[in-house]
Image (cartoon, rainbow, N blue to C red):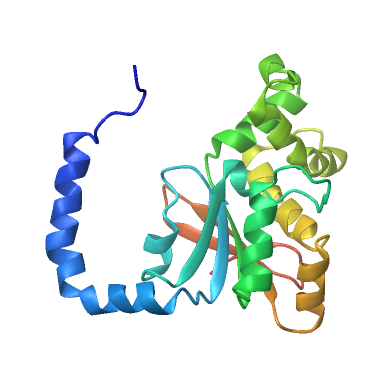
């Protein structure tokens, strides 16, 4: 039996609604995007969480952001080992081919991936310690951030680790030679953000103080 099935009816209805309204009213713009290619000004690295809607937060149009989503908005360190690296490939394409001017890492409240990392690091999630856990091995990227927080305060809060995930990702971005070069030459800027889903708040990582402040 083939595993693929037709789309659920509600998605079919939504598509036809979009085609009849948004697309119909902006068809020239969509054709221009298709014919001329994408020229996004920024790359946004955000979480897979369905509650994080980057284009809504910034009121962005199609073609404006190059968006990469993964568990807990993490960027791994530069590892040119010949293996498959989806996030690293997205960063490489954005910086070297699309030549975006900004890379934004966006963390968020109530992040399940970050909570899983916290549970794992504190010995409460043995299933994530298994070598076969894709989530656990991915969240290993955040272990150095957890350790930094723990060294400062034995009681690590989930919200603090959510914000630390952004810092870890930015630090790891700078291990990519082409990112470091673009930043040094003033062709690329890195930005750290954290959003509170329930309150609609947005905070930015202040480079001067290293602290988060309201946007």
Relative vertical location of residue 124 with respect to residue 188 in this rendering, above or below: above
Is there any visible trace of residue 93 in the rendered image? yes
x, y (%) of residue 73?
61, 49
Q: Is residue 196 left or right of residue 31?
A: right
> Which image quadrant for residue 161?
top right
Count numbered badges in the picture: 0
- The residue at the point 75 percent across, 19 percent down is 123
> Which image quadrant for residue 32?
bottom left
- The residue at the point 79 percent across, 58 percent down is 171
* Residue at the right extreme of this rendering: 151
Between 44 and 23, which is closer to the camera in this rendering?
23
Image quadrant containing the N terminus: top left
Relative vertical location of residue 200 with respect to residue 151 in this rendering, above or below: below
- The residue at the point 74 percent across, 71 percent down is 207
Is there any visible trace of residue 156 in the rendered image? no
- The residue at the point 68 percent across, 22 percent down is 128
> Which image quadrant for residue 102?
bottom right
Q: Is residue 62 left or right of residue 180?
A: left
x, y (%) of residue 77?
80, 51
* Residue at the bottom extreme of this rendering: 186
x, y (%) of residue 155?
75, 33
Between 19 and 190, which is closer to the camera in this rendering?
19
Q: Is residue 3 left or right of residue 85?
A: left
* Residue at the front extreme of this rendering: 1
């Amino acid at each position: 039996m083939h595993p693929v099935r037709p789309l659920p009816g509600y998605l079919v209805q939504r598509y036809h609604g979009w085609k009849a309204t948004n697309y119909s009213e902006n068809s020239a713009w969509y054709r221009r995007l298709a014919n001329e290619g994408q020229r996004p000004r920024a790359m946004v690295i955000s979480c897979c969480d369905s509650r994080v809607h980057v284009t809504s937060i910034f009121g962005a149009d199609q073609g404006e952001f190059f968006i990469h989503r993964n568990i807990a908005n993490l960027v791994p360190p530069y590892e040119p080992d010949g293996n498959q690296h989806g996030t690293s490939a997205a960063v490489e394409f954005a910086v070297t081919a699309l030549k975006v001017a900004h890379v934004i890492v966006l963390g968020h409240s109530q992040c399940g991936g970050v909570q899983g990392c916290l549970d794992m690091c504190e010995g409460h999630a043995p299933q994530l310690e298994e070598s076969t856990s894709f989530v656990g091995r991915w969240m290993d990227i955040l272990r150095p951030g957890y350790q930094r927080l723990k060294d400062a305060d034995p009681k690590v809060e989930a919200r603090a680790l959510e914000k630390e995930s952004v810092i870890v990702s930015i630090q790891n971005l700078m291990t990519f030679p082409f990112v470091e070069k673009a930043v040094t030459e003033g062709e690329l800027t890195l930005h750290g953000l954290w959003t509170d889903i329930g309150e609609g708040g947005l905070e930015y990582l202040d480079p001067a103080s290293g602290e988060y402040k309201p946007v």
